[in-house]
Image: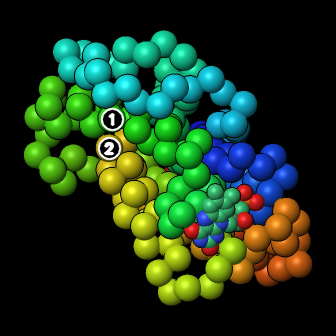
Amino acid sequence: MPKITAVFGSPRRKGNTATLLRQAIKGARDAGAEVNEIVLRDLKMSPCLEIYGCKQSGQCAIQDDFQGVLEQLLTSQGIILASPIFFYTVSAQTKILMDRCQSQWVKKYWIDKVPFGARRPSRKALFISVGATKGKKLFEGSLLTIKYFFDTLDTQLWRSCLYRGLDFEGDVLKHPDYLDEVYQAGKEFTAVL
Ligand SMILES: Cc1cc2nc3c(=O)[nH]c(=O)nc-3n(C[C@H](O)[C@H](O)[C@H](O)COP(=O)(O)O)c2cc1C
């Protein structure tokens, strides 16, 4: 049974990305995955303080909920990350998690001295995102951000489910096709883990 960690990155508990993520989780569980849910807004997680307390050991020196989240991510075969677009990138809650993973970047590239691109990814990720507007470049910033975040975690981005034109809580419920698509993505994701 593959283990997946699902990360709710929105400050809204019942927002569009949370609704989509719950559908993806349902698909993954129906396909036999064990899914562990992390709701970032409920956690105590400081932003990275750039003190490089991680320089010797690769472990973040700030003691809070980050350590538990990292443990979950690193012991999973799959990660499903859902974040809304805030100013053309991920939410602040999601970005805090990413920045705290700089300790993993330090471990990989400074301590273990892995040449960039040399290590085979050991897990896969599904990214879910929504934004209110409809511009062509809406997801470009966040896709670049998650590419390097997932690389840090030796994770390959398997698929992105991206939806435009969703703003208010519940907007996504007007699009059953989106809900079906992420449910299927959750199922198919489990099958490739
Ligand atoms: C702080 C903030 C910044 C936002 N920035 C953007 C943006 O750059 N582009 C966009 O299309 N929508 C933007 N939005 C709208 C959200 O992406 C949209 O409401 C989305 O549906 C929220 O998803 P959620 O319900 O999962 O939180 C922003 C919303 C907030 C609160």
Residue 16, compared with residue 55, is above or below; it is: below
Mark 1 and mark 2 lie on one chain; the one further toward the N terminus is 1
Identify which residue is drawn at 23% across, 31% down.
Answer: 106
In the displayed orientation, state which residue is furthest to the front: 87
* x and y, in percent, of residue 28 in the image: 70, 54
Along the line of sight, the residue nearer the viewer: 89 or 17: 89
Kindly identify the amino acid type of the residue bearing the numbered disc 2: Thr
**Are there few (<14), some (14-19), or many (20+) residues within 10 Å of tag 2?**
many
Identify which residue is drawn at 15% across, 26% down.
Answer: 111
Q: Quadrant of the N terminus?
A: top right
Residue 149, compared with residue 173, is above or below; it is: above
Identify which residue is drawn at 14% across, 31% down.
Answer: 110
Identify which residue is drawn at 76% across, 54% down.
Answer: 18
Q: Which numbered disc covers residue 152? A: 2
Along the line of sight, the residue nearer the viewer: 106 or 74: 106
Residue 34 in view: no
Q: Secondary structure at mark 2?
A: helix
* x and y, in percent, of residue 163 in the image: 66, 76
Q: Report the side of 131 relative to 171 (left or right).
A: left
Q: Quadrant of residue 178?
A: bottom right
Ligand 1 - quadrant of the structure image: bottom right
Is there CB contact under 8 Å for labels 1 and 2?
Answer: yes
Which residue is labeled 1 in the image? 102
* x and y, in percent, of residue 128 in the image: 61, 63
Q: Secondary structure at mark 1?
A: helix
- The colour scheme of the drawn protein is rainbow
Along the line of sight, the residue nearer the viewer: 86 or 108: 86
| Circle nearer the viewer, 1 or 2 | 1
* x and y, in percent, of residue 119 in the image: 21, 46
Kindly identify the amino acid type of the residue bearing the numbered disc 1: Gln
Q: Which numbered disc covers residue 4? A: none
**How much space separates mark 1 and mark 2, taking CA atoms?**
8 Å
